[in-house]
Image (cartoon, rainbow, N blue to C red):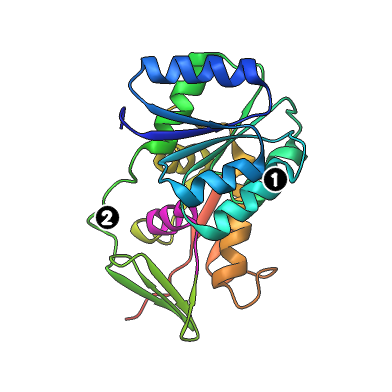
Amino acid sequence: MTNARILIVDDEPQIRRVMRATLVARGYMVSTARSGEEALEKVREERFDLILLDINMPGIGGIETCRILRSQGEIPIVILSVRNAEKEKIEALDAGADDYVTKPFSMPELLARIRAALRRAPMLSPGTPEQLSLGHTVIDFTARRVTVGGTEVRLTPKEFDLLRYFAGNPNIAIPHAKLLQAIWGPDYGEEVEYLRVFINQLRKKIESDPSHPEYLITEPWVGYRFNVPRHD
């Protein structure tokens, strides 16, 4: 998607200029915003395929902006931050970000992250059912719709892609790296905290008791297993 529309949100003019020039040179269509408030206004007025969002800004800040954006739609959001602590990453992912890039970053690294965020999720694998019922939870993979007790539950794009991958590979332990590469792309594999956040979010949405999951099972030191009851 080299003609994708990207919104850069950063309060540093020089960073906005450099990123804009680089992305325009790669064929992307780019708009910029200096604050979270301005970003929210632009998203209301225009359609974007991706948002690059600085976490440290005056006003409502990057995390709250991310939370609001995610509550309003499914635009991929990549957080940019000078902080590399796991706590900040988890906070950003928990707010709805798809990815987290630490400043200073190289432009090739940022471009790779942009391509990963824009890449379309793989099609349904042959083993993925069109619909799956887990107790009171019904997952319609064709319509990308989840209902729990008859009430629709909203999943982020990454949460749904993760759930769909699990459904195509049920009842087996899937290593962290394999999950990351399947959902985020081949350049990933070490970002285990991403999985922790997204699995916890999914558990809150589809498990009757998230603290004692019945379906999304942790396999210590390995990864996760999607427990689908077999019906003989």
> Which residue shows up at 44% across the image and 37% down it?
117
> To which residue does mark 1 refer?
63
Residue segment shown in magenta: 154-166
List the single residue furthest toward the left.
126
Query: What is the three-letter code of the residue carrying label 2?
Result: Leu
From what the image shows, is residue 175 above or below residue 114?
below
Q: Earlier in the sequence, mark 2 or mark 1?
A: 1
Q: Residues within 10 Å of mark 2 (few under 14, many from 20)?
A: some
Front residue of 30/88: it is 30
> To which residue does mark 2 refer?
124
| Majority secondary structure in the magenta region | helix
> Which residue shows up at 56% across the image and 62% down it?
202
Residue 159 horizontal/vertical position (percent): 49, 55
Q: Residue 168 is drawn in which quadrant? A: bottom left
Describe residue 173's horizontal placement relative to residue 37 as left or right. Answer: left
Describe residue 199's horizontal placement relative to residue 155 as left or right. Answer: right
> Quick one: SS at disc 2?
loop
From what the image shows, is residue 68 above or below residue 8?
below
Front residue of 131/1: it is 1
> Quick one: SS at disc 1?
helix
Residue 166 horizontal/vertical position (percent): 42, 57
Residue 88 horizontal/vertical position (percent): 74, 39
Front residue of 123/214: it is 123
